[in-house]
Amino acid sequence: MPIDPQASLTITGFDWVPDFARGYVRDLRPRWACEEIGLPYAERLISAVKRPQSHFADQPWGQVPVIDDDGIRLFESGAILLHLGQKHPGLLPDEPQQRADALSWLFAAFNSVEPMMFELGQVTLFAAGEQWAEARKPSLMAFIGQRLDRLADALGARDWLAGPFSIADIAMATVLREAGDTDLLGERPVLAAYLARATARPAFERALAAQLAAFSDHPPGPSDSTGETP
């Protein structure tokens, strides 16, 4: 596995999250990218319960991931994937049009698909049972379905979005996983098969195992939170 405490690249993640979030925290994305190309990285685990004040200087909202790549710091998983893809061979196609397609799909995953998946989580998990959430759910599901139909049409019979597997597929596959237990993918076999191919990759399995292994079994208390306190 690429995890190496002496690596020049450090990925910041959380040391604990609730069970429903395990395997879905966004530091999975740079972990997966590193695993795809065998790029060593170190972990910096912080408390999600009492986040170190210094972390807000690197990520204004206190979220993860953040990376430190030999002194260059980035936040937002899309920016991190783009940075890694441009710096390291194997994450972006070399052919110009395929490379352009990969960049387009990278942004599409986060701008055209993920916001609706985030809202889906709000109405089905965080606000489940509330009147406004139940009223919103049918129209939201219909809208997401339309977006996914267009995605399925665009993917067609190809294995990956831009020719070879790329950071665009890391982005889109992690977004599609957020459909959870809904029928959104089951009703669209092209996308279900696409996600199955992506998550069957050994690099994904290693990245997922690394994230899960980082989590403690219980949230840290005031006396054992990671890093300095605000």
Image (cartoon, grey):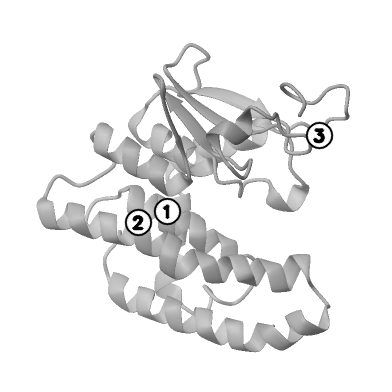
Disc 2 packing (10 Å; few <14; some 14–19; many ≥20): many
> At 59% from the left edge and 82% from the top edge, which residue is drawn?
141
Label 1 residue SS: helix
Marks 1 and 2 sit apart, C-alpha to C-alpha, by 6 Å
Identify the residue under disc 3: 217
Residue 155 x/y as whole percent: 30, 70
- The residue drawn where x is 74% and y is 80% is 133
Task: Tell me the SS state at disc 3.
Answer: loop
229 or 135: nearer the viewer: 229
| CB under 8 Å between discs 1 and 2 | yes
Which tag, 2 or 3, sits closer to the chain's start?
Answer: 2
Q: Distance between the residues labelled 3 and 1?
A: 28 Å
Question: For this rendering, which residue is in front, 86 or 199?
Answer: 86
Labelled pair 2, 3 in contact (Cβ < 8 Å):
no
Q: In which quarter of the image is residue 84?
A: top left
Q: Residue 63 carries which label?
A: none
Q: Distance between the residues labelled 2 and 3?
A: 33 Å
Q: Is residue 181 left or right of residue 198?
A: right
Choose mark 3 or mark 1, whichever is in front.
1
Q: Which amino acid does label 1 sit on?
A: Ala
Mark nearer the N terminus (3 vs 1): 1
- Say which label, 1 or 2, has the lower sequence index: 2
Any part of residue 34 in sight = yes
Label 1: which residue? 171
Look at 76% across and 31% down and name the residue there: 216
Name the residue type under label 3: Asp
Work out whether 174 lies above or below 149. Answer: above
Q: Position of residue 59 (x, y in %)?
A: 56, 39
The residue that disc 2 covers is 106
Give the image location of residue 78, x and y in percent: 41, 48
Q: What residue type is labelled 2?
A: Leu
The C terminus sits in image quarter? top right
